[in-house]
Image: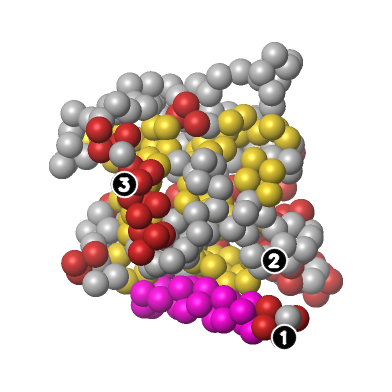
Amino acid sequence: TRASRFADTLRSRASRRSAVSRSSRPVVTSAKSRDGDDAWWASGIFSALLPPRAKEAAREIEYFGGSPLQQILPWVPGPRTDSPGRPWAADKENQLLLFDFTENSPDADAVAFEKAWGALNDVVMGGRSEASVSLVRLPEAEGGMCAKLSGVVEGDGGGFVSMRSRNFQQSSDLSDYDGVRLDVRGDGRRYKLIARDVEDFFGLAWHASFDTVEGEWLEVDVPFADLKPILRADVVEENTADFRAFRKDRVKSLQLMLSKFELGMGKRNPTFASGPFALEVKRIRAYKNADDPQTRKAPGVLEAARGERGEDTPGSTGGSAAR
């Protein structure tokens, strides 16, 4: 009945609200906390005239693209962050540590985090979602700290929220690696990794989806071979003028997103629902050895975890492997 469906919706939203609040207090918030009152949209007549969502859109665009002058003049460099990549101590031969948000890591330093990562949400295209990126405390046994993308996503008028790195000072050369490994804890929704090999804000971007299990830390492998090129919200098909291979020797930025669309606007995300959400991230690594038996058996780990909870596996062929 309609009443029972409404009750189920309320219970689902309550569960996701619990996921958002899980895990403790923020240490460093995203762009909202790092801006002063001297930004053009936060002072003078603009501050008085612009509605809050327009200010938030301006804040996010400026964080990644720079000031209006930087965006207009191509020879004026925009914001950059240090290029990631250092050997992963536990497996120097096969893994490159790109970002480590656990306690005492350089990437978990408040200043470094503020310069590298920010929220990019659908407000930049007129949407109504609200999300922020922060560093939050964890129990010491779980690493002491992690990055967290959380807030409320709204499917009407946009339908996406994300945490994105600024463009790297120098391209990251991942040509010796087979994919990206994420240490994440989600809320049961399907998210996606977006990688770019160009600095153009509206240029080609490569997407691949991955699934999460509510409340469980997972290692998720996203092979470079799974990345699909997206341009202006459409999948770029082979044998078309804009199609080309992903250049993993010149990675420019990384992004983690929750969207109502899985690939372009032609395929819906089967797990998407408006309301509170949360994705926590401990590490982002590049890995070798795609033929590792651990990687090949990985999809079964996610399926088993869902089975224990009595959950459906939404479109299991769409998500990348969880370990």
In front of the other: 177 or 97: 177
Q: Which residue is denoted by mark 2 in the rendering? A: 154
Q: Tell which circle, 1 or 2, labels the residue nearer the N-terminal end.
A: 1
In front of the other: 8 or 32: 8
Residue at screen point 43% across, 38% down: 222
- The answer to whether residue 306 is visible is yes
Magenta: main secondary structure: helix
Amino acid beneath label 1: Ala
Q: Tell which circle, 2 or 3, labels the residue nearer the N-terminal end.
A: 2
- For the N terminus, the image quarter is bottom right
Examine the rendered structure and indicate whether residue 216 appears above or below residue 193: below
Q: Position of residue 18 (x, y in %)?
A: 47, 79
In which image quadrant can residue 271 be found? Answer: bottom right
In front of the other: 187 or 121: 187
Q: Position of residue 193 (x, y in %)?
A: 51, 43
Residue 3 is labelled as 1
Q: Which residues are magenta?
A: 7-28
Examine the rendered structure and indicate whether residue 43 appears above or below residue 306: below
